[in-house]
């Protein structure tokens, strides 16, 4: 094969767009030219342009006090109105607009708080309490009273009907009176001190008025034998079982599931029973059947749903729960393992992305995808390009996440790792990854199309700006955003040759306030260090001698308004830039006889945006390295 030759006179161009996210999976020189080994607070739009992220503002002005926000939730009431709920330390608040939160309840555990709703009632789990909020007040639950047996003879027997309720102490037995028996044997012994009641037909009798109770043996003796009938004697009594209510009260997360419909609530996360999951009654979170539980090989970390399946995320693998109904209408929820290799380490990392559960494991972020064979599952590792940074983070088991704007956000320690799964390419088959900092999130919530997060440190809730919002969208609660993108150390396809990088062409999107600082590094030694040069481009330094001022697009069917706006003018950085068209800028470089060249573009200015549409380097290949 003939040796490749290069023309040392004719220059070449290297285009660095479209941009394709960050990749720290290996040696930076070996990644794709369009990827970055180091980028921060930048994302990539559907055109492949590079954008500085927007900032965030306080939802309300005054902090609730030190400490993290333990949970935020949008509760929809029966009248279709909503309330924004905020848990902080031991207190629950409601909040609207930009008003200061209003105290609703004191007495929560100072821990992560989980909310869910069913039948327009909000349920609150804090790991110690199982509370109910109806839009007016917070109260303890009112437990459903199950009928343990039906069609019982006075002496006992009968047909099993419902399980005892773990979270309550009351139960019922339904007897068919024979007209002669006065002693009725209940299903349970060792009754507690709760007053026993009896309903005979439509008459309600109280303990001590027509009957007596033998609590030790679970017997009720009537003064007069109840009449003969079918299920005409209903006796309600109480039995307290130590530890039963705590099985439910100590749970910390839930999911609604019932096959094709969300008919039941599944709970888990009890630190004293970490391998257990519990199932509620039909549309009734006040009923937790004694036998409605599952025990798995190790700790349950969370739930997700895929099609008509409930996915149970264990620390060491994955189970699947399905809905089944027999010919007689008996409902069951069988469970089986579908993966024993990849588990989940962070409960709040679980999201559904394009119908597939995504979660954080000890080895990175994985996706559970349906295979071509019915009832089989496989998992795919989707965070390989960021794992070398992600897995060095502390407290990964406390990571929180949200699916927002077709992006998977995974936050911990003020950092957010973002998978833009809408932008798949051959090089990034699962999407492009970005990294943001200075986002101290303890929980996320999407509300009215905006992204909110609770602070992990200062008792505040924040809302992210959108690009099209008026005002200054590019600061984090008054702090400037440091955004940058670095190219890989470029060799221009030939490591063995010297190169001269002659010029940089950069395409910028005009905005009310924008600038770009660029710098480059080479392998060429300058006084013992690398050659590092920096330059700032902003619209104040543009040569307008050959630049026309357009106020209207050529298509006369619509008008593009000037970027000039007196409502958002910074007279310290004033220009007469009115054009809506991108501005192409050129800068001569002095990178001569280098082997590696790394470009950086950045903006860390308060209330300034940055959109880089294109980056093009003009270079020449020189002689072989000697």
Image: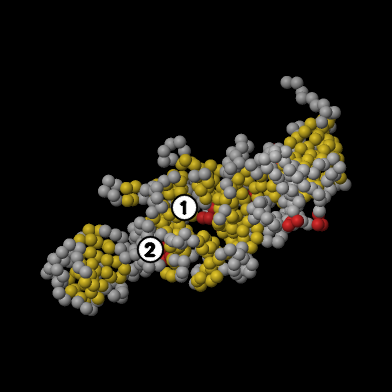
Residue at 61% over, 49% down? 418
Image-quadrant location for residue 494? top right
- Which residue corresponds to mark 2? 286
Q: Quadrant of the N terminus?
A: top right
Q: Secondary structure at mark 2?
A: loop
- Position of 540 with respect to 476 (left or right) is right
Residue at 64% over, 63% down? 58
Q: How many marks?
A: 2
Q: Secondary structure at mark 1?
A: strand
- Position of 292 with respect to 39 (left or right) is left
Question: Marks 1 and 2, how far apart in space?
Answer: 20 Å
User: Is any atom of residue 397 visible in this view?
Assistant: no
Q: Which mark is residue 303?
A: 1
Tag nearer the camera, 1 or 2: 2
Image-quadrant location for residue 426? top right
- How packed mark 1 is, by other alpha carbons closer than 10 Å (few <14, some 14-19, many 20 or more), is many
């Amino acid at each position: 094969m003939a040796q490749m030759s290069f023309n040392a006179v004719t220059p070449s161009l290297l285009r660095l767009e479209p941009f394709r996210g960050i990749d720290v999976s290996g040696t930076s020189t070996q990644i794709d030219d369009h990827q970055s080994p180091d980028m921060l607070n930048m994302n990539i739009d559907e055109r492949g342009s590079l954008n500085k992220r927007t900032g965030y503002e306080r939802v309300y002005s005054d902090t609730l006090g030190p400490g993290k926000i333990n949970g935020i939730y949008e509760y929809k009431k029966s009248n279709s109105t909503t309330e924004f709920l905020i848990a902080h330390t031991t207190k629950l608040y409601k909040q609207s607009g930009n008003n200061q939160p209003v105290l609703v309840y004191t007495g929560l555990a100072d821990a992560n708080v989980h909310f869910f709703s069913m039948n327009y009632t909000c349920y609150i789990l804090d790991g110690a309490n199982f509370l109910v909020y109806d839009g007016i007040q917070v109260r303890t639950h009112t437990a459903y009273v199950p009928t343990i047996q039906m069609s019982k003879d006075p002496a006992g027997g009968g047909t099993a009907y419902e399980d005892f309720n773990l979270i309550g102490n009351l139960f019922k037995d339904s007897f068919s009176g024979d007209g002669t028996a006065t002693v009725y044997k209940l299903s349970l012994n060792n009754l507690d001190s709760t007053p026993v009641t009896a309903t005979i037909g439509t008459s309600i009798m109280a303990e001590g008025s027509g009957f007596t109770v033998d609590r030790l043996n679970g017997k009720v003796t009537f003064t007069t034998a109840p009449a003969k009938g079918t299920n005409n004697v209903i006796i309600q009594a109480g039995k307290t079982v130590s530890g039963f209510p705590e099985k439910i009260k100590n749970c910390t997360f839930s999911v609604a599931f019932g096959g094709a419909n969300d008919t039941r609530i599944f709970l888990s996360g009890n630190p004293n029973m970490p391998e257990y999951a519990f199932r509620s009654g039909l549309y009734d979170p006040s009923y937790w059947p004694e036998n409605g539980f599952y025990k798995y090989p190790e700790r349950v970390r969370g739930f997700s749903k895929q099609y008509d399946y409930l996915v149970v995320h264990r620390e060491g693998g994955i189970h699947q729960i399905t809905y089944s109904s027999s010919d007689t209408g008996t409902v069951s929820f069988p469970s089986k393992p579908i993966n024993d290799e990849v588990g989940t380490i962070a409960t709040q990392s679980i999201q559904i992305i394009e119908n597939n559960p995504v979660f954080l494991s000890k080895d990175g972020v994985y996706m559970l995808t349906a295979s071509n064979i019915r009832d089989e599952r496989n998992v795919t590792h989707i965070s390989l390009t960021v794992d070398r940074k992600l897995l060095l983070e502390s407290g990964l088991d406390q990571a929180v996440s949200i699916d927002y704007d077709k992006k998977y956000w995974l936050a911990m320690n003020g950092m957010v790792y973002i998978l833009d799964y809408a932008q798949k390419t051959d090089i990034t088959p699962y999407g492009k990854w970005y990294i943001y900092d200075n986002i101290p999130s303890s929980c996320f919530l999407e509300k009215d199309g905006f992204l909110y997060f609770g602070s992990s440190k200062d008792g505040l809730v924040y809302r992210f700006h959108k690009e099209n919002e008026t005002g200054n969208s590019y600061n984090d609660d008054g702090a400037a955003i440091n955004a940058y993108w670095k190219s890989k150390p470029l060799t221009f396809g030939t490591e063995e040759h010297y190169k001269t990088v002659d010029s940089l062409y950069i395409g910028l999107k005009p905005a009310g306030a924008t600038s770009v600082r660029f710098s480059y590094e080479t392998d060429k030694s300058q006084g013992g260090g690398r050659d590092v040069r920096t330059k700032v481009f902003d619209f104040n330094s543009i040569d307008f001698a050959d630049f026309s001022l357009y106020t209207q697009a050529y298509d006369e069917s619509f008008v593009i308004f000037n970027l000039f706006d007196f409502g958002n003018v910074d007279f310290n950085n004033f220009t007469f830039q009115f054009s809506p068209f991108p501005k192409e800028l050129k800068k001569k470089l002095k990178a001569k006889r280098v082997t590696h060249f790394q470009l950086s573009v950045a903006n860390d200015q308060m209330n300034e945006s940055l959109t880089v549409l294109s980056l093009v380097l003009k270079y020449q290949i020189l002689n072989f390295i000697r």
